[in-house]
Each structure stands twice: as structure tokens, then as C-alpha cells.
């Protein structure tokens, strides 16, 4: 079988997808990347139905070329009072320091999985591309998305996940190397020892599946793009490098951390959501250890952290802030997304 090119599958000038980054960008960054010839993405995991609809309207009216909307499809967790109490106890020194009573902190889910209710919101927009993290939605829901003509993508962190995604209907697979910022898309295993860096993961996934493979993780400039294409990628998905562009909504504290020496030390942590995600090491990660046994199931860990995050951020500190970042921040610059996209595009020449 001849593998289709990414730009045949997703019409755009460049086989370059701007990674969806929940909490750090909206339609403004997506529009800028689309205008520069790439595929812009809207992360929808943390948007209310109203906010999602408003963003989709902007993209439909203004996007040039193909754009992507991204959802999480994790199993909804069952809240567990005892587990929540253990988590708050682990955080107690931080609550004491902040003068917060943990019994007054409301539980908050933060992220809801893709559902028929969400599909109702996006159906009228028939997004050109819909990408998922943590696997794929149930077959009937996936069939619904495909019935609009949307191209479906999802992240694989192992060869087994790539094969699974192809077998279950993904039109292309994103090979998410261990260097990547944000949440690991892992869904067939919770064992972190299975997770491979991009140089090992990409060629093995490219060999294992027939659909186009999009490389993600650690790509920060045109040389990174060239390396990914040489290792069998049909295109690239770049996240971290876009975080300091003016069109991103990355907070000032997060931008400062990304541009500092602190960004040289990232780790996978479960503290902020319950699932492993890569971020710059901060005081909470140093104190509790980045992978904590008491962190509740995704995304329930978020609620207890929220007031601590707010408390320290009000003081101009990132002690309890998730500073999502990949291992390679060398591409983070305060330049327009069009400029960064043009630089990355040289890697396809
Ligand atoms: C701040 C941030 C937020 C992210 N949020 C999402 C998300 O909402 N959905 C998703 O599929 N991937 C998310 N990711 C992961 C990206 O899709 C991608 O795998 C990663 O950015 C690629 O590696 P890089 O950051 O080294 O470029 C996020 C990454 C970052 C850095």
C-alpha cells in the first residue's frame, strides 16, 4: 500500500500541524499558523460548549485552509472521597503555607471527555480535522465524526498504540515522543517505561503502520523537521516552540519560565491532573516528587491544586503552576507564529 501524503489527506501548503495546547492558546494562534501555510489547532478539552462554539465560529469565518479541533477521550473517573482526602493531606504543607482550608476547596473536574453532547456543538462546523488525545472515542461517536468528512488523528506513544489507532479508524497517527510537552497521550498502558524518545519511536511506528505518521516531541527548528522527515514522518506537530508567540495565550509567568534556565529541567508529573504530563520542574514537583501515588485519577487531581496555583501566582510565583513544556525549548521566541512557521517550513525544502 502506498502511504498517502499528509497534505493529500489534510489539504494545506505545509505538512505542519501546530499542536493543540489546552490552556495556552485559542483560535488566534491557530489562525496565524493557518495563514502561514500550516494546520492550526484549537484545543477544546477545557472549553465550555459556549466557548467552543464561539471559537469554532471564528475559525470557520477566518481560517485559511485546513484547521484542527482537539479533544481528550479519557474514561470519565469515578470520584472517590477517600482518595481525594489522601491527596489533600499530601498537599497540606502547601495549604498551610497559603492559609487555605483544604475542606473548603471545591472539587473540580476541569476537563470532560469527548461525547455526543460535544459532537452536537461541532457537527454544524464539520471541522476539516479532529484530533484526539488518549485514544479514540467509542466506535459510534467516531463514526459520527467521520460522517462529516473530518480527518481523524490521534497520538500514539508506543508501536502498539499506533497499530491500535490504525485498526480503529485513525486516518493518521501522531507519534508522540517522550520529549513532548504536556500530557502523554498514552492509553493502552500506564507504564512509563514503555515510553520512547522520538528518534526511537518514529521510525518504528512508520514501519508498523500504513497511514501517515506525524512526528511530535522535541521539534523546535528546521533541522528538527528535517530529522523527523528523514526518520519516516509524513509531517510534524510542533507545540512548545509556539508557546512564546504573541498569538498564544501562555501566561507571563509561563513565558518567563520557558525563556529561562529553569526550562532545561522538565519532568513527567502526575501532580496537576493525575496523568503524566511534561512540565518545567517547580517547587511542588520538587517537594512531593513529580509522580505522586496519592494524585487522584485524571483529571481529578486538578481541583485541589487550583487554589494553591492561584495563591502563588498572585504573588508572582509558579510554585504550584503547571508549566507545560517539552524538553527542547530552544525554539521558544517571542516572534509572530508566521515567522516561526516559515522557519520550520525550511525543513521541508
Ligand atoms: C502547553 C501544552 C499543552 C498541550 N495540550 C495538549 C492538548 O490539549 N491536546 C493534545 O492533544 N496535546 C497537547 N499537548 C501535546 C502536543 O500535542 C504535542 O504532543 C507536543 O507539544 C509535541 O512536543 P513539543 O512540545 O516538544 O513540540 C500539549 C503540549 C503543550 C506543550
Image (cartoon, helix red, strand yellow):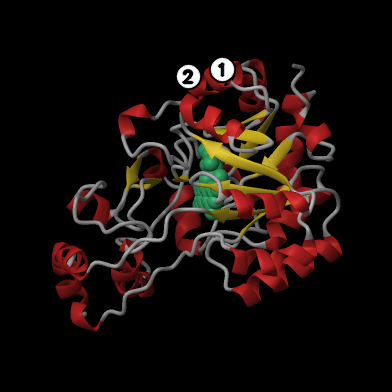
Identify the residue under disc 2. 200
The quadrant of the rendering that contains the C terminus is top right
Residue at horizontal 64 percent and vertical 41 percent from the top: 153
Label 1 crowd (10 A; few <14 / some 14-19 / many >=20): many
- Residue 35, position as x, y percentages in the image: 83, 50
Identify the residue under disc 1. 203
CB of mark 2 near ligand 1 (< 8 Å): no
Task: Describe the element under mark 2 as helix, strand or loop.
Answer: helix
Task: Describe the element under mark 1 as helix, strand or loop.
Answer: helix
Front position in the image: 197 or 318: 197
- Residue 7, position as x, y percentages in the image: 81, 34
Rendered position, 294 above or below 92 = above
Is residue 115 at least partly visible in the picture?
yes
Rendered position, 323 above or below 51 = above
**135 horizontally vs 56: left or right:** left
Front position in the image: 98 or 167: 167
Rendered position, 139 above or below 112 = above
Instruction: Report, in whole angstroms, how far the alpha carbon at label 2 lies from the one at label 1.
Output: 6 Å
Residue at horizontal 36 percent and vertical 50 percent from the top: 275
Amino acid at each position: 500500500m502506498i502511504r498517502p501524503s499528509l497534505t493529500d489527506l489534510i489539504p494545506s501548503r505545509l505538512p505542519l500541524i501546530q499542536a493543540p495546547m489546552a490552556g495556552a492558546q485559542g483560535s488566534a494562534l491557530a489562525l496565524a499558523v493557518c495563514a502561514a501555510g500550516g494546520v492550526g489547532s484549537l484545543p477544546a478539552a477545557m472549553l465550555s460548549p459556549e466557548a467552543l462554539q464561539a471559537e469554532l465560529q471564528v475559525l470557520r469565518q477566518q481560517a485559511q485552509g485546513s484547521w484542527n479541533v482537539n479533544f481528550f477521550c479519557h474514561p470519565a473517573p469515578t470520584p472517590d472521597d477517600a482518595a481525594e482526602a489522601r491527596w489533600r493531606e499530601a498537599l497540606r504543607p502547601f495549604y498551610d503555607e497559603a492559609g487555605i482550608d483544604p475542606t473548603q476547596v471545591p472539587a473540580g473536574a476541569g476537563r470532560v471527555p469527548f461525547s455526543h453532547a460535544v459532537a452536537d456543538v461541532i457537527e454544524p462546523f464539520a471541522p476539516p480535522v479532529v484530533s484526539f488525545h488518549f485514544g479514540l472515542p467509542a466506535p459510534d461517536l467516531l463514526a459520527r465524526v467521520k460522517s462529516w468528512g473530518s480527518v481523524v488523528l490521534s497520538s500514539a506513544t508506543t508501536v502498539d498504540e499506533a497499530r491500535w489507532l490504525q485498526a480503529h479508524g485513525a486516518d493518521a497517527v501522531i507519534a508522540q515522543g517522550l520529549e513532548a510537552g504536556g500530557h502523554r497521550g498514552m492509553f493502552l498502558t500506564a507504564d512509563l517505561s514503555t515510553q520512547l524518545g522520538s528518534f526511537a519511536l518514529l521510525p518504528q511506528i512508520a514501519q508498523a503502520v500504513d497511514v501517515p505518521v506525524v512526528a511530535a516531541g522535541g521539534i523546535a527548528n528546521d533541522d528538527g523537521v528535517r530529522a523527523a522527515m528523514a526518520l519516516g514522518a509524513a509531517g510534524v506537530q510542533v507545540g512548545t516552540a509556539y508557546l512564546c508567540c504573541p498569538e498564544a495565550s501562555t501566561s507571563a509567568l509561563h513565558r518567563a519560565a520557558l525563556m529561562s534556565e529553569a526550562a532545561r529541567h522538565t519532568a513527567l508529573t502526575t501532580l496537576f491532573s493525575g496523568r503524566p504530563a511534561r512540565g518545567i520542574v517547580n517547587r511542588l514537583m520538587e517537594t512531593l516528587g513529580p509522580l505522586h501515588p496519592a494524585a487522584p485519577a485524571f483529571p481529578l487531581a486538578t481541583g485541589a491544586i487550583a487554589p494553591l496555583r492561584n495563591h502563588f501566582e498572585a504573588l508572582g510565583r509558579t510554585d504550584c503552576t503547571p508549566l507545560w513544556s517539552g524538553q527542547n525549548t530552544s525554539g521558544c521566541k517571542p516572534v509572530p507564529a508566521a515567522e516561526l512557521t516559515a522557519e520550520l517550513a525550511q525543513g521541508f525544502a
